[in-house]
Amino acid sequence: MLVVDLLLFAKEQLELRTIKNFQYGLGFLPTAFAYIIYTCGLKDIEASKASILTTVEPVVAR
């Protein structure tokens, strides 16, 4: 996604600060947000079901 955004802008318009903002906006924020939602969802599930979910989830996500 970052490559597509960078190709849309002329290289003269890009600054290092702009590139870092893209990195934070497209990398850090969605990752942290997904982790927080996942952790909040696990609080409501009992431990045995949560352990099965965390074991099966990477296989299903593939």
Image (cartoon, grey):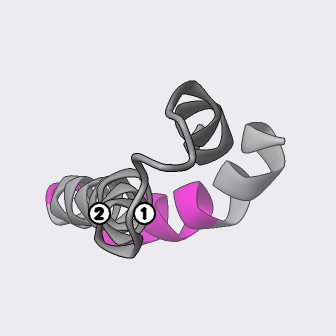
Residue at 33% across, 66% down: 24
Where's residue 29, x and y in %?
27, 60
**Which of the two residues, 54 or 32, is positioned nearer the viewer here?**
32
- Tell which of 39 and 4 is nearer to you: 4
The C terminus: image quadrant = top right
Q: Is residue 45 magenta?
A: yes
Task: Kindly identify which residue carries mark 2.
Answer: 21
Q: Which residues are magenta?
A: 44-54
Q: Position of residue 35 (x, y in %)?
A: 33, 65
Q: Main secondary structure of the magenta part?
A: helix
Residue that appears at 38% across and 55% down: 22
Is 35 left, or right, of 23 in this rendering?
left
CA gap, disc 2 and disc 1: 5 Å
Q: Quadrant of residue 23?
A: bottom left
Looking at the image, residue 8 sits to the left or right of residue 24; the answer is right
Q: As displayed, is residue 33 above or below residue 17?
A: above
Q: Find disc 1 in the rendering and name its residue.
A: 19
